[in-house]
Image (cartoon, grey):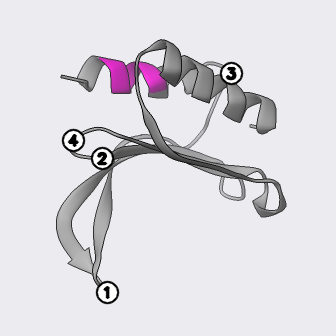
Amino acid sequence: MNKETFDHVLKELADSNFRVEISEYHERAFGSWHITLMTAPKRRLVWDGKERWYVVEEETAEQFNGMNKWKDIWTDRHPKKDSVQYGVKFLCDGKA
């Protein structure tokens, strides 16, 4: 995935009425990125460019070093062309 895909995900989330709290793209980190949504509980989409993992995470109440931990709630470890749409669809279907 690349910057174009990152921008596409941001657009899909906006089109689905999600509000983005944080979005960061890191070209030097193999094109990794994450997008944190203003949901309750908070959810985020993460692309690990080095390991090639696409993950949707949810913030938990459990803490480590004073920060809330995140848990994986949807993972695609072998992303394909339509993986981005599946991740966004998962968020939309789970949104209340």
Q: Which circle marks residue 81 in the picture?
A: 3
Work out whether residue 36 can be spotted: yes
Residue 18's place in the image compared with 68, above or below, is above
* Mark 4 burial class by Cα count in 10 Å: few <14, some 14-19, many 20+: few
Residue type, numbered disc 4: Ala
Q: CA distance from mark 3 to mark 2?
A: 26 Å
Residue type, numbered disc 3: Lys
Q: Are marks 2 and 4 in contact (CB under 8 Å)?
A: yes
Image position, residue 7 (x, y; %): 70, 30
Q: CA distance from mark 1 to mark 2?
A: 19 Å
Residue type, numbered disc 2: Lys
Image position, residue 24 (x, y; %): 64, 51
Q: Which circle marks residue 40 in the picture?
A: 4
Q: CA distance from mark 3 to mark 1?
A: 37 Å
Mark 3 or mark 2, whichever is nearer to me: 2
Mark 3 or mark 1, whichever is nearer to me: 1
- Magenta-span inclusion, residue 55: no
Q: Earlier in the sequence, mark 1 or mark 4?
A: 4
Q: Are marks 3 and 2 in contact (CB under 8 Å)?
A: no
Q: Which circle marks residue 42 in the picture?
A: 2
Q: Which residues are magenta?
A: 88-92
Image position, residue 39 (x, y; %): 28, 38
Q: Which circle marks residue 65 in the picture?
A: 1
Q: Position of 25 compared to 4: left or right?
A: left
Does dot 4 land on a helix, a strand or a loop? loop
Does dot 1 land on a helix, a strand or a loop? loop
* Identity of the residue drawn at 67% across and 23% down: 8
Q: CA distance from mark 3 to mark 4?
A: 29 Å
Does dot 3 land on a helix, a strand or a loop? loop
Q: Are marks 1 and 2 in contact (CB under 8 Å)?
A: no
